């Protein structure tokens, strides 16, 4: 166990997950103070957390003798950041500046970075399960996945330069739960769910409560290394759609991409190239190191996490027919015909 009286800095506290984590770790008896940093104030109650309105390059790390830094401010959707260029600036450049501040601060002893299994990509050449030593079969060329790959590279560089700092990198599977708003939860909230014809993606989830527990575990236990964090088991996309009692619409990949553009422009859901790849091939990760070295056990399996997410979703009701009609107007005629004829037979 770590010595008491530590000062923890948490980035990304304006979003729900960051705010909830900062509040939770502030209650830990080994922590004397938690400082939350973000460019905008959090909307909810942050309890005993001291909020600093600043970007993550702010010298608060050195001023406050911070010894533990938890980096949670990596953004997955361009819309929430004000565009792709701003998203990359915040993700990659922001992380570089944070690590530079950590490098200059002799008080920093532990760095925890919330990463994602998206870094492994999704392709037809993937293994059944990715271990932490594996990389993507196809290197990401753009978007969130490329940002994460660059961020992890900078974190590894920091670990080499500051070998005295314990660095814990958590690659979380898609976080899901009643309070999570993300590309994958927005997709499953659609009244009609487009799927890629001929494919049934393998899905692995992490419940939002387990994400918070894993981060707090990382702060308290201070186990260095890179760890996949995910619930037990795999859920096929077809199973997930059936359990939500939604209508699925299988269509060619190019048509799903067209649907994604329509939904993205309407701000209904965010479909990125990595999202489309994930919904085509899916992804599975090995969690042996999570249990045997990191010493963490999720409370929710993949299926249980998904069930908890779905428990509060409203019924699609009559919206399904309206959405299908809207797709017919917006998509190329051949794609719309395929979508509508397929959707008639899937529930």
Image (cartoon, rainbow, N blue to C red):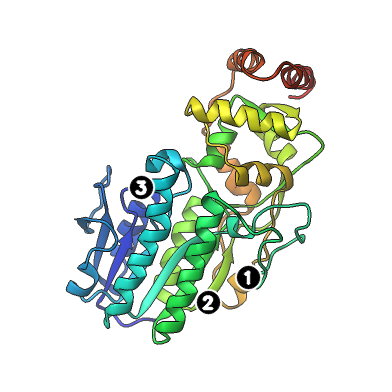
The residue under label 2 is 225
Is residue 222 something one can see in this rendering? no
The residue under label 3 is 15
Give the answer, above or below, for where 326 lies relative to 46.
above
Is 177 placed left or right of 2 in the picture?
A: right
What is the x, y in percent for residue 114? 46, 62
* Residue at mark 1 to residue at mark 2: CA–CA distance: 10 Å
**Secondary structure of the residue carrying numbered label 2:** strand
Where on the picture, by quarter, is residue 197? Answer: top right
**Secondary structure of the residue carrying numbered label 3:** loop
> Which badge, 2 or 3, is on the more N-terminal residue?
3
Q: Residue at x 53, y 32 (%)?
A: 269
Within 10 angstroms of label 3, few (less than 14), some, or many (20 or more) residues? some
The residue under label 1 is 132
> Which badge, 1 or 2, is on the more N-terminal residue?
1
Is residue 44 something one can see in this rendering? yes
* Residue at mark 2 to residue at mark 3: CA–CA distance: 26 Å
> Which badge, 3 or 1, is on the more N-terminal residue?
3
Q: Quadrant of the C terminus?
A: top right
* Residue at mark 3 to residue at mark 1: CA–CA distance: 27 Å
Q: In this view of the protein, which residue sits in the foreground, 290 or 53? A: 53
Give the answer, above or below, for where 341 lies relative to 213.
above
Residue 186: mark: none
**Secondary structure of the residue carrying numbered label 1:** loop
Q: Residue at x 26, y 59 (%)?
A: 36
């Amino acid at each position: 166990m770590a010595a008491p009286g530590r000062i923890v800095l948490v980035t990304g506290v304006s979003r729900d997950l960051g705010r909830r984590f900062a509040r939770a770790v502030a209650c830990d008896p080994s922590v004397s103070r938690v400082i939350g940093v973000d460019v905008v104030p959090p909307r909810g109650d942050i309890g005993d957390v001291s909020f600093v309105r600043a970007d993550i390059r702010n010298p608060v790390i050195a001023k406050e003798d911070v010894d533990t830094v938890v980096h949670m401010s990596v953004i997955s959707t361009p819309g929430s950041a004000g565009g792709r260029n701003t998203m990359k600036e915040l993700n990659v450049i922001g992380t570089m500046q944070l690590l530079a501040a950590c490098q200059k601060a002799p008080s920093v002893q532990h760095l925890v970075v919330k990463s994602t299994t998206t870094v492994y990509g999704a392709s037809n050449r993937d293994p059944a399960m990715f271990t932490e030593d594996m990389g993507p079969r196809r290197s990401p060329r753009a978007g969130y996945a490329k940002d994460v790959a660059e961020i992890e590279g900078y974190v590894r560089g920091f670990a080499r330069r500051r070998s005295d700092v314990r660095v814990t990198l958590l690659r979380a599977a898609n976080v899901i739960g009643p309070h999570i708003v993300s590309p994958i939860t927005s997709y499953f909230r659609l009244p009609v769910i487009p799927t890629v014809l001929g494919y049934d993606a393998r899905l692995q989830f992490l419940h939002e409560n387990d994400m918070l527990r894993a981060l707090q575990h990382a702060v308290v236990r201070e186990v260095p290394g890179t760890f996949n964090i995910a619930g037990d088991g795999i859920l096929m996309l077809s199973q997930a759609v059936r359990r939500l009692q939604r209508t699925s619409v299988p269509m060619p990949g190019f048509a799903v991409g067209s649907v994604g553009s329509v939904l993205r422009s309407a701000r209904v859901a965010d479909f990125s190239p990595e999202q489309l790849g994930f919904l085509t091939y899916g992804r599975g990760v090995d969690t042996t190191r999570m249990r045997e070295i990191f010493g963490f056990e999720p409370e929710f399996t993949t299926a249980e996490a998904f069930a908890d997410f779905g428990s509060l979703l409203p019924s699609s009701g009559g919206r399904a027919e309206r959405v299908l009609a809207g797709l017919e107007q917006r998509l190329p005629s051949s794609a719309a015909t395929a979508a509508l004829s397929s959707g008639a037979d899937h529930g």
